[in-house]
Amino acid sequence: MKRTMTCIECPRGCALEVTLENEWKVSSVAGHQCPRGEKYARQEIEAPMRTLTTAVLTRGLELRMLPVRTSAPIPKGRLMDAMSAVKKIVVSAPVETGQAVAENFLGLGVDLVATRGLGPAD
């Protein structure tokens, strides 16, 4: 089975042709002009990862929602679990940009970090 995809790892946007042994195992990758293309195709088909970008509720801060993201990509299959967990988080202390709002988020070895700072409400 063959699958085509566009690599997004660099500005070249190589058209990749991926040969699969079964639906989820890559046997070869063609069309990449750098080593990142093959790595990207294997990762995207065998174990896709995504960075979660969302917001958590706040209490007593200048905004009601604090923008956050995972410090590294997490398995795509865990995104719905992650969103369920995010809904339960409420931040009430001042927070700085880059500060962990939840450490080792879902036991995945990544933190959920603030993407902006928020001080107390006036």
Image (cartoon, helix red, strand yellow):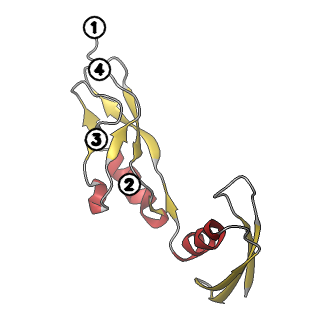
How far apart marks 2 and 3 lie (CA) works out to 15 Å
Q: Residue furthest top?
A: 122
**Which of the marked residues, 2 or 4, is nearer the chain's N terminus?**
4
Q: Which residue is mark 3?
A: 100
The residue located at (28%, 13%) in the rendering is: 121
Residue drawn at 30 percent across, 60 percent down: 109
Judging by the rendered image, the residue that carries numbered circle 2 is: 82
Which residue does the image show at 38% across and 54% down from the upper left? 82
Q: Give the vertical position of 23 relative to 33 (above or below).
A: below
Viewer-proximal residue, 119 or 10? 10
Q: Residues within 10 Å of mark 2 (few under 14, many from 20)?
A: some
What residue type is disc 2 on?
Ala
The C terminus lies in quadrant: top left
Whole-number angstrom distance, CA of label 4 to CA of label 3 = 16 Å
Q: Which residue is mark 4?
A: 61
The residue under label 1 is 122
Rate crowding at label 1 as few (under 14), some (14 to 19) or many (20 or more) other CA atoms within 10 Å: few
Q: Which quadrant of the structure image shows residue 14?
A: bottom right
